Image: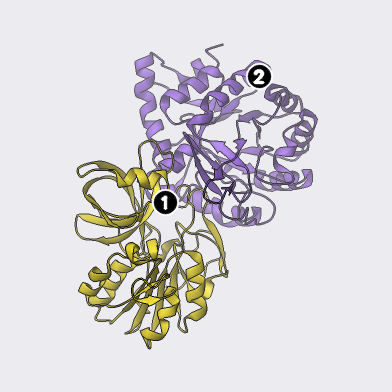
């Protein structure tokens, strides 16, 4: 992914060949909504997923009684459904966790640029922390489909928060778990598993900003980092989520959430 | 066939719906999802002399029936707006464009209004003297009648297009300020900008917004905006662009009955990118239902 942008708008067309980012507004039906781990839920939504093109993109969900939508990264998708994994962090996500199978949600899909798998090399390293882990699942799946051999580091606070360990393994990825309290896997932060990961050709990261910064400082390769920010619209209109980059100001919802390592300004 | 046309200082809009500045980018982003030529006009993102990053994150907070924003006038600066953003919008939008100008000094307002007024595609200049999210300038020009009049006089002396002064609701008497603008030569009044508010995060017990305060918008402010449009209509005879929490065609009719000639849609675009489109499309049916043939006939009709 190459961005030579200056002003918001210059990197609009990071997704697709020459195509513009086309978001879609449609109704999705909840197929399942289950608890995976402490405060962590997985929701499978049936609907028109044609706007979702890349791992690392997100959907923006309208909830009754809440003015703003809730932006959640896409964990996986197939021809007519999308899976999201979300953490209950406030009233909106708490409301989501109580929704039942069959309930309908109005969703904007196909948002954000997503990860580019072209420059990954043969042995990419994927590092996710907590609620930053879900988009790495579709990314690992795509990389493996391309014949690459990804190593995945999944960082959690403790064992009761661990999710998708087996799912990543089932894809064929090499999985390393870290927990801050040492209750499972390597004790410490995701970056403490770098040594065990061995050689790698590229770095993909998603997680809280302190983790991203630690990965940025530890990683010896180029990479792509997915950022989180409070959003207004989620599709580039309000300038609510803008950050500074070496190539100008970028909207996390539109020119992001994935930024390449060389453009990141801490 | 109902007639939805309205007239803003000689600029005829095919309908009164104008996405509000700051909630619709530079317009062309929305052209990817629908034909924006169904809109009456577009008020583009507020522009200053220099490029501005705006405030540090976070800039957005949710509220009951609305939201707070503290963007802080992020924009690419007037030169880039003229050389890049306006041409991009013009390619996909053939209707009248409203430029929105902000400033930190009278000189800056004058500089920007003079430049943008020379652009053929800009038909109205909306002068924002009401931004609550910047430390100097912005709202301070709009909170006293004499300051508002001074900016109005200065920009009117150079602007080649009709000038609409965008007013703040965070004042003692908005009608008094509107009247001062009219006397200083304003062609119209836009109101309201957002209401200053704040939220506190219970997890860290600190303000949610980095800027501490932000501007409240959304349906929560609609009744306040409506009351202020009513008051300003009583005080001036120039056209009013009414805004503040407008989310439905019904809200548009209420705004016009209170005295608005045209109506801006703001936060609703952020909640739903199709909001302005939906309002435009449901307006004729609502007019039929209410027995309104010519929309212009109802302006100020509730007085």
Q: Residue A88's spot in the image, x, y percent?
A: 38, 51
Which quadrant holds residue A79?
bottom left
Residue A89's mark? 1
In the image, A26 versus A135, the foreground residue is A135
Above or below for B169 versus B1: below
Label 2 secondary element: loop
Which quadrant holds residue A102?
top left
Mark 2, residue position: B237
Report whether A110 appears left or right of B73: left
Q: Colour of chain B?
A: purple
Residue occupying the point 46% across, 33% down: B65
In the image, A193 versus A119, the foreground residue is A193
**In whole angstroms, how far apart are the C-alphas of marks 1 and 2?**
51 Å
Label 1 secondary element: loop
Instruction: Give the quadrant of the C terminus of chain B.
Output: top right
Q: Residues within 10 Å of mark 1 (few under 14, many from 20)?
A: few
- Mark nearest the camera among 1 and 2 is 1
Above or below for B9 versus A223: above
* Label 1 chain ID: A
Report whether B183 appears left or right of B244: right
In the image, B10 versus B184, the foreground residue is B184
Which chain did the renderer colour yellow?
A: A
Q: Residue A147's spot in the image, x, y percent?
A: 24, 81
Residue occupying the point 44% across, 79% down: A192
Q: Is residue B237 visible?
A: yes
Above or below for A172 versus B118: below
* Residue farthest along the top direction in this orientation: B303
Residue occupying the point 69% across, 55% down: B50
């Amino acid at each position: 992914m190459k961005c030579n942008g200056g002003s918001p708008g210059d990197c609009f067309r990071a997704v697709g060949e020459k195509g513009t980012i086309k978001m879609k507004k449609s109704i999705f039906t909840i197929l399942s909504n289950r608890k995976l781990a402490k405060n962590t839920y997985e929701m499978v939504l049936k609907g028109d997923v044609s706007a979702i093109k890349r791992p690392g993109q997100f959907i923006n969900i309208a909830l009754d009684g809440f003015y703003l939508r809730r932006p959640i990264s896409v964990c996986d998708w197939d021809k007519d459904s999308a899976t999201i994994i979300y953490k209950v962090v406030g009233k909106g996500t708490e409301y989501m966790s109580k929704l039942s199978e069959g309930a309908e949600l109005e969703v904007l899909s196909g948002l954000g640029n997503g990860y580019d798998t072209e420059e990954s090399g043969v042995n990419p390293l994927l590092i996710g922390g907590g609620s930053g882990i879900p988009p790495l699942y579709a990314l690992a799946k795509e990389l493996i489909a391309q014949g690459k051999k990804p190593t995945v580091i999944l960082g959690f606070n403790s064992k009761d928060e661990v999710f998708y360990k087996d799912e990543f393994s089932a894809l064929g990825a090499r999985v390393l778990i870290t927990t801050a309290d040492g209750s499972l896997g390597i004790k410490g932060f995701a970056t403490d598993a770098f040594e065990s990961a061995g050689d790698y050709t590229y770095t993909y990261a998603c997680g809280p900003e302190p983790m991203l910064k630690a990965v940025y400082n530890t990683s010896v390769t180029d990479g792509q980092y997915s950022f989180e920010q409070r959003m207004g619209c989620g599709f580039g209109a309000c300038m609510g989520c803008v950050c500074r980059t070496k190539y100008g100001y970028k909207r996390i919802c539109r020119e992001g959430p994935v930024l390449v390592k060389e453009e990141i300004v801490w | 066939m109902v007639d939805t046309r309205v007239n803003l200082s000689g600029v005829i809009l095919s309908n009164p719906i104008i996405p509000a500045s700051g909630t619709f980018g530079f317009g062309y982003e929305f052209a990817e999802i629908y034909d924006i030529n169904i809109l009456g006009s577009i008020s583009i993102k507020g522009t200053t002399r220099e490029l501005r990053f705006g405030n540090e994150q976070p800039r957005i907070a949710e509220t009951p029936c609305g939201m707070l924003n503290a963007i802080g006038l992020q924009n690419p600066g007037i030169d880039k707006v003229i050389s890049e953003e306006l041409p991009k919008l013009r390619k996909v939008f053939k209707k009248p464009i409203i430029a929105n100008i902000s400033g930190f000094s009278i000189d800056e307002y004058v500089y920007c209004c003079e430049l943008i007024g020379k652009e053929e595609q800009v038909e109205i200049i909306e002068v924002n003297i009401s931004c609550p999210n910047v430390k100097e300038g912005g709202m301070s020009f709009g909170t006293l009648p004499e300051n508002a009049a001074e900016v109005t006089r200065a920009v009117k002396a150079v602007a080649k297009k009709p000038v609409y002064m965008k007013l703040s609701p965070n004042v003692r008497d908005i009608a008094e300020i509107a009247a001062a603008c009219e006397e200083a030569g304003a062609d119209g009044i836009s109101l309201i900008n957002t209401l200053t508010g704040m939220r506190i995060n219970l997890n860290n017990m600190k303000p949610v917004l980095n800027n501490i305060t932000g501007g409240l918008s959304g349906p929560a402010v609609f009744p306040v905006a409506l009351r202020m449009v009513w008051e300003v209509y009583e005080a001036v005879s120039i056209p009013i662009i009414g805004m503040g929490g407008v989310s439905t065609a019904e809200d548009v009719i209420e705004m016009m009955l209170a005295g608005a000639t045209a109506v801006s849609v703001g936060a609703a675009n952020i909640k739903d990118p199709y909001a302005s489109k939906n309002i435009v499309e449901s307006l004729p049916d609502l007019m039929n239902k209410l027995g309104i043939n010519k929309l212009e006939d109802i302006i100020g009709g509730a007085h």
